[in-house]
């Protein structure tokens, strides 16, 4: 039955379930589905390996769930890896604040999402979703999927070429390189991910470096990149920067895999394919070396942004109230609750007649009972007996004794230890009551004197010893 109580109870139940589920999602470490695509994720597509690698290399690293503009008062390196394109499109103002912060000397590392969301997602006013690079004022650069000509080969030839590339890499690993110094620490940090190998085919490519990358790695780097659907950076306009390039197909042109672009007094580092930093490929060849170089800025801690991963959204059910059709559903439930409550509190139609109180006042009740008792033959002995019993009951209760302990001698013994004057008054009052009860027809003066002695037995716990 639809009543005010049932509707209010249902609304409270929904709110409690939402809050409990939000707390559970915050306490747990998401490791499955889309929720694992952040630094909490331990599956192949997560970034827990990168977080642990930086910590193993003694680089200060932390996570933050708040919007990025709340971190810009610190000297940090902000890492935004694979942000949700839908949140980037619906909440771009925080990235605009990050762009202004970079112009003042900040450093942000961005790895765009590997794949764009399909149509079955949160409705957006603009389609397709906007790129985080565009919101960071890096409008000259885009991240696109590179399709090499080798993808047109048969599956057997592709598999054979991948195996050959892997064998070639194993043969070249015997060459000494300065970047191998960090390999033991990296392998130790990634030990937790054993057994989570990815089925994604991988190609090993030799990179060509320039600018800051060449100064840091003069011998070059070997990277493990996805053999199919690898993402690269495309520059619409020529801009200055430092690049990591590699040839992804035989006889092809070098493609940009990573870049560092100066922006004002700061810089924006871009990783073309976020999978290079994921658990599945981070421990392969020099991937960890490249990603660590992008993030490790001397004297600055690394802060991973989880807001654009959707951690805050997934942990806050109230965010759904801003999205259709959940906002329409919430408004409907709220409107129904208010309507039912108003209807139950307000009577429609003519006003009801005023109710006449059916219960008498206390003074009227006492007056009626006194007239009833006075009609009896001997009302005074009955009233004095009830007065004696009530006096003993009140004294016993205020002394803290158990029920049924209205014995006169025991009460007087306890009361003499706590308040001797009151014990004397009680003894005199009980004697007067007993004398009045033994008298066949007590006079009014005797009854008044007895009541006066009873009135002197007022009990105040603050006067007890």
Image (tube, grey):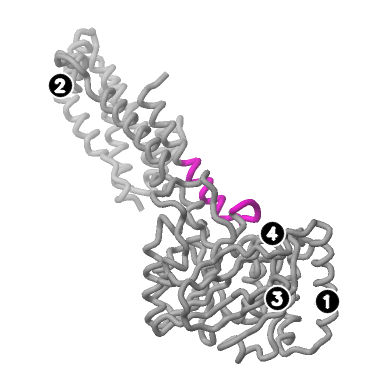
Q: Is residue 237 magenta?
A: no
Q: Position of residue 61 (x, y in %)?
A: 56, 75
Q: Secondary structure at mark 1?
A: helix
Asked whether residue 327 is in view, the answer is yes
Q: Is residue 275 above or below residue 215?
A: above
The correct choice, above or below, for 387 with respect to 352 in the image is: below
Q: Position of residue 69 (x, y in %)?
A: 39, 68
Q: Is residue 191 above or below residue 349?
A: below
Residue at mark 4 to residue at mark 2: CA–CA distance: 97 Å
Q: Determine the residue positioned at 58% across, 76% down.
A: 258
121 horizontally vs 368: left or right: right
Question: What is the spatial separation of the Cα atoms under label 2 and label 1, in whole angstroms?
Answer: 125 Å
Instruction: Please tell me in which quadrant of the rendered image residue 191 appears.
Output: bottom right
Mark 3 vs 2, N-terminal side: 3
Q: What is the secondary structure assignment of the residue under circle 3?
A: strand
User: Residue 162 falls in which quadrant of the image?
Assistant: bottom right
Q: Which residue is mark 4?
A: 43
User: In x, y percent, where is residue 327?
Assistant: 38, 41
Measure the alpha-carbon separation of dots 3 and 1: 13 Å
Asked which quadrant contains residue 409, the reply is: top left
Find residue 444 and name its label. 2
Q: Earlier in the sequence, mark 2 or mark 1?
A: 1
Question: Is residue 303 something that shows in the picture?
Answer: no
Q: Which residue is mark 3?
A: 223
Query: Can you tell which mark lies on residue 168?
Result: 1
Mark 3 surroundings within 10 Å by alpha-carbon count, few (fewer than 14), some (14 through 19), many (20 or more): many
Say which quadrant the N terminus sits in.
Answer: top left
């Amino acid at each position: 039955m639809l009543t005010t109580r049932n509707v209010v109870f249902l609304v409270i139940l929904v709110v409690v379930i939402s809050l409990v589920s939000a707390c559970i999602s915050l306490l747990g470490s998401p490791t499955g589905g889309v929720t694992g695509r952040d630094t909490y994720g331990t599956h192949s597509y997560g970034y827990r390996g990168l977080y642990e690698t930086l910590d193993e290399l003694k680089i200060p690293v932390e996570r933050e769930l708040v919007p990025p503009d709340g971190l810009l008062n610190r000297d940090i390196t902000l890492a935004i890896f694979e942000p949700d394109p839908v949140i980037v499109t619906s909440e771009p103002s925080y990235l605009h604040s990050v762009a202004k912060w970079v112009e003042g000397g900040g450093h942000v590392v961005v790895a765009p999402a590997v794949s764009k969301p399909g149509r079955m997602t949160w409705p957006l006013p603009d389609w397709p979703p906007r790129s985080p690079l565009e919101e960071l004022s890096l409008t000259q650069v885009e991240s696109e999927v590179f399709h090499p000509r080798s993808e047109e080969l048969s599956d057997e030839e592709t598999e054979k070429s991948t195996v050959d590339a892997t064998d070639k890499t194993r043969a070249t690993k015997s060459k000494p390189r300065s970047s191998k110094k960090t390999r033991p620490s990296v392998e130790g940090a990634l030990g937790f991910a054993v057994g989570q190998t990815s089925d994604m085919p991988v190609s090993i490519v030799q990179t060509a470096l320039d600018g800051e990358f060449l100064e840091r790695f003069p011998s070059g780097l070997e990277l493990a990149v996805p053999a199919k659907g690898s993402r690269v950076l495309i520059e619409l306009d020529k801009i200055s920067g430092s690049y990591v390039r590699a040839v992804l197909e035989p006889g092809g042109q070098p493609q940009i895999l990573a870049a560092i672009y100066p922006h004002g007094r700061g810089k924006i580092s871009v990783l073309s394919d976020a999978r290079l930093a994921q658990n599945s490929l981070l421990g392969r060849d020099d991937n960890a070396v490249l990603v660590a170089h992008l993030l490790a800025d001397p004297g600055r801690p690394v802060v991973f942004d989880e807001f654009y991963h959707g951690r805050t959204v997934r942990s806050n059910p109230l965010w759904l109230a801003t999205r259709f059709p959940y906002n329409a559903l919430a408004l409907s439930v709220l409107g129904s609750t208010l309507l039912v409550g108003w209807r139950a509190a307000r009577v429609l139609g003519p006003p009801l007649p005023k109710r006449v109180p059916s219960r008498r006042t206390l003074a009227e009740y006492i007056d009626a009972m006194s007239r009833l008792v006075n009609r009896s033959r001997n009302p005074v002995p009955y009233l004095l007996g009830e007065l004696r019993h009530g006096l003993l009951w009140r004294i016993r209760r205020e002394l803290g004794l158990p029920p049924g302990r209205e014995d006169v001698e025991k009460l007087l013994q306890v009361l003499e230890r706590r308040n001797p004057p009151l014990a004397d008054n009680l003894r005199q009052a009980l004697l007067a009551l007993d004398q009045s009860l033994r008298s066949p027809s007590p006079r009014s003066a005797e009854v008044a004197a007895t009541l006066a002695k009873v009135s002197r037995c007022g009990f105040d716990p603050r006067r007890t010893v």
